[in-house]
Amino acid sequence: MSYLQVLKLFKSKLKRGLAIVVATAALLTANSANAALLGLNLAPAPDIFSSFITVDYDMGTETLTADGFALNFFDGANNAIAGGTFSLTASIDNSGVLSGGSLMIMGTTAGFNSGTLLTGSITALGFDDGGGDPLEFMLDITGGDLAGMYGPHGGIIMTSTGLTANLFTESFSSGAMAASSDVGVPVTVPEPEGLLLLSVALMGLVAARRRSY
């Protein structure tokens, strides 16, 4: 086989491989377009459990608030929180896009007595496009007595929030003290888009090579 023939064969295989990559990426994009959950899994400890939370979303101000009581802190033992409060505020537009927010958990527990247990800045939002539970948040830890146990990042999984199939296109509420929340450390984080596309590319090229033999 001549050099030119080899070159043409290589180009043909490369084009087929790229076509597979593009088609597969498009399929994955279509399949993921209706799924906006972060898929958070939280480590068993540390974990702050809060309940009797009232969640309200105002479609006019595009603001979500969640206020309730921080009850227990798990660090391998179940520690009651004295005077515990839970407060979350997030700016979420009517398309469900987060632009910022904050978390503050107050109280004392297990020798942590300053009164501020954990604070953080909300960095990501996850929710089911069909409505319902849960609401998920990622946050950067900014302070509090428990910050050293959490490290730089935390995750929040909130249930019974009152989110409906209309999502953030209308105001909604959980009802008085109906929601609950866990604030922990994520043990799985959604795969970065770049790594996903690289994986798709490798799969496409392998498939093209197999068909050539």
Image: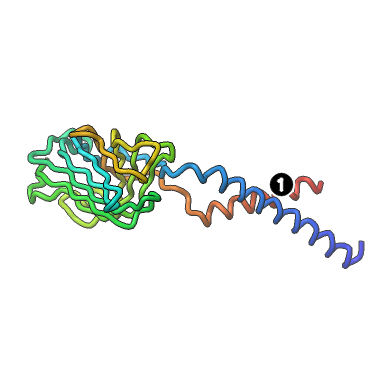
Which residue is at 22% across, 48% downward? Answer: 88
Screen quadrant of the N terminus = bottom right
Q: Position of residue 72 (x, y in %)?
A: 17, 36
Color theme of the render:
rainbow
Q: Residue furthest bottom?
A: 4
What amino acid type is highlighted by mark number 1? Ala
Which residue is at 41% across, 39% downward? Answer: 128
Q: Residues within 10 Å of mark 1 (few under 14, many from 20)?
A: some
Residue 74 seen in this snapshot:
no
Which residue is at 17% across, 47% downward? Answer: 105
Q: Is residue 167 above or below residue 21?
A: above
Q: Residue furthest right?
A: 1
Q: Is residue 93 left or right of residue 84?
A: right
Q: Position of residue 92 (x, y in %)?
A: 33, 52
Residue 137 seen in this snapshot:
yes
Q: Secondary structure at mark 1?
A: helix
Q: Is residue 68 left or right of residue 128?
A: left
Number of dots carrying numbers? 1
Depth check: give the residue in front, 171 or 108.
171
Residue on which the image places disc 1? 207
Q: Position of residue 165 (x, y in %)?
A: 40, 37
Depth check: give the residue in front, 108 or 163.
163
Q: Position of residue 24 (x, y in %)?
A: 64, 48
